[in-house]
Image (tube, helix red, strand yellow):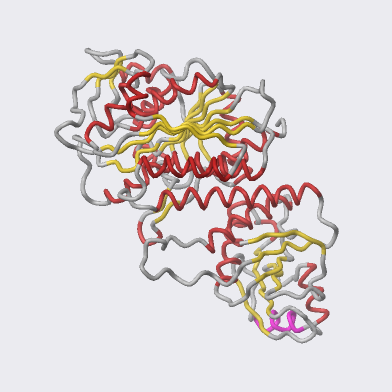
Amino acid sequence: MEFSIKQGSPEKLKSGCAVVGVFEDGKLSKAAQALDKAAKHALSDLIARGDMSGKASSTLLLHGIPGIVAERVLLVGLGKASELDSKTSVEILRATFKALQDTPAKEAALFFTGDFAGREHAWVVRQAVFAAAESAYRADSMKSKPAKPPALKHIAFITPEPPSAGSKTALGQAAAAAHGMKLTKDLGNLPGNICTPTYLAKQALALAKAHKSIKATVLEEKDMHKLGMGSLLSVTRGSAQPAKLITLEYRGGDKKQQPVVLVGKGITFDSGGISLKPGAEMDEMKYDMCGAASVLGTMQAIAEMGLKLNVVGVIPSCENLPSGTATKPGDIVTSMSGQTIEILNTDAEGRLILCDALTYAARFKPDTVIDIATLTGACVIALGHVASGLFSNEDKLAQELLAAGEQAHDRAWQLPLWDDYQPLLDSNFADMQNIGGRAGGTITAACFLSRFAKDYRWAHLDIAGTAWKSGKEKGATGRPVPLLTQYLINRANGK
């Protein structure tokens, strides 16, 4: 799908579908008023008859309106101007593109992005791009007969005045972020027998080949043995698939600029190991690599944007399976940091691969390290599927990420990382154990990771509740690519 932004008038612009807004009180937006005048009040007559209420997210498709050159007109309900918060605005945009996808229109012109009271035009455009991309997304590449691609190929955002340079930049960045979300979703939705650690490594190498600004490196298990990554390697012992440690280096900033390092959990399938998970919904554990997928998606997005920033992606990837060689509950392993870990539950494996990756990240002399992981079911219980869990050893960093999440409407919520929780990880036999019990499970998991991130600014995003949807709408969401890209955009802009 292609996007553009330009100046134009709704009654004069030829398009497959002109999209204008109607408020709940029946008041037409300025663009709708212009169409109504050209159509000799055909729109206001429809509203007067009750065909369009203007209720938020309602839509009405019209054909062959006299006096209007567009083939179709889509009226979109904007509700009450005073109630256009971020949630309602996003729902309106999603409803708009759902309605557009039900038409044979190949292109659409949106004239209502300036009608969202209290919302910056750039914010509305960004959310519209995300909604458009989501409406066009199909996860049927593995089907013998994939669905016919959507007809809608081009979206134009039309403004009454010449669009500003800021709006054009925001549009380009949003499109790049949407491309990154697509890659993240594509990888997440693939089954574990296709998307293996080796497959992820190949995708990283392909990404580097497509973008000269990215350098990719893949370490094998023998390399990890030399580095002393006993914790990471303990997870992969039960699998026939070799583990990979993938590194992506994007150098868009000054050579002396310290990078932001993104560490993504890449468990391509998680059975729980010897601590076997229940069979119901275990298929969804193909999504346990969504942290890794989000790092790949983010790296692709910032390369497309050409951000003036240095960013490194580190992806520890393996499978967690039971076998005669698998790690057992009670085993003690030595991490790359030299700290020993008593593994009481092999299903708490994400932290075991991340801790070595966090130690490895220090060699890049980072300014900031952010790990992204589908880490704990406890986070889903705490926050549901709305917000990602956020932890940090620096409040300023936490606030930067929270603000980026609000900007991108990809929100996170900060949870405590107090020392009071650390004793729950005490072990009689090793430096620590890998679980802290049922109480505060998402917090003790973050506390575990914090022990390996003391040498730099660090944040942890637990995306277990936000990386994918279950049920009828099962599928990867592409989160938190919007949050991460917005954070990096803000960094590149000096904010």
Can you name the residue that lies furthest to the left here?
A: 324
Q: Residue at x 68, y 76 (%)?
A: 16
Q: Quadrant of residue 209?
A: top right
Q: Is residue 452 left or right of residue 251?
A: left
Q: Is residue 31 left or right of residue 364?
A: right
Q: Is residue 373 above or below residue 156?
A: above
Residue 168 image offset from top left, x and y in percent: 75, 51
Can you name the residue that lies furthest to the right here?
A: 161
Q: Quadrant of the N terminus?
A: bottom right
Is any part of residue 474 visible from this angle? yes
Residue 216 sits inside the magenta stretch:
no
Residue 489 image offset from top left, x and y in percent: 66, 38
Q: Residue at x 37, y 46 (%)?
A: 287
User: Which range of residues does the magenta coloring cover?
Assistant: 42-50
Residue 164 image offset from top left, x and y in percent: 82, 51
**Numbered-mark total:** 0
Residue 44 sits inside the magenta stretch:
yes
Q: Residue at x 56, y 29 (%)?
A: 398
